Amino acid sequence: MKLFFTERNIVVLLFIMVLITFSLAQNETKKMEQLYNGGHFSMKKFSPPRLEAKTTVPVSLNTASPIIQ
């Protein structure tokens, strides 16, 4: 009778189990991402907002103020 649990077979079995585990974890992560985002978009389609100035420069500066010396 041939021995089934050789070192090579155990390594192959563990490798397959790791692939299955990571595949399931990836699917669950996608589901959680959709629930968190409300199903509107995924992180792959997300583009960060453009950084624009939030403050405005006053149009008229009061240049007629007296200068104290």
Image: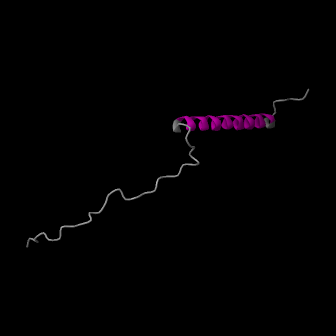
Asked if residue 62 lies left or right of residue 53, the reply is: left
Residue at the extreme top: 1
**Residue 18 placement (x, y as % from top left):** 70, 36
Asked if residue 36 lies left or right of residue 22, the reply is: left
Q: Is residue 16 magenta?
A: yes
Q: Residue at x 54, y 49 (%)?
A: 46
Residue at the extreme front: 60
Using the rendered view, name the quadrant where residue 13 is placed.
Answer: top right
Q: Residue at x 86, y 29 (%)?
A: 3
Q: How many marks?
A: 0
Mostly what secondary structure, the magenta segment?
helix
For residue 20, above or below residue 67: above
Q: Is residue 32 magenta?
A: yes
Quarter of the N terminus within the rendering: top right
Of 43 and 6, nearer the camera is: 43
Residue at the extreme left: 69
**Residue 22 placement (x, y as % from top left):** 66, 37
Of 6 and 50, nearer the camera is: 50
For the magenta stretch, what is the residue range?
Answer: 9-35
For residue 57, above or below residue 20: below
**Residue 63 placement (x, y as % from top left):** 17, 71
Q: Residue at x 60, y 35 (%)?
A: 31
Q: Which residue is drawn at 23% across and 66% down?
A: 60
Quarter of the C terminus within the rendering: bottom left
**Residue 52 placement (x, y as % from top left):** 40, 58
Asked if residue 7 lies left or right of residue 25, the reply is: right
Asked if residue 56 lies left or right of residue 35, the reply is: left
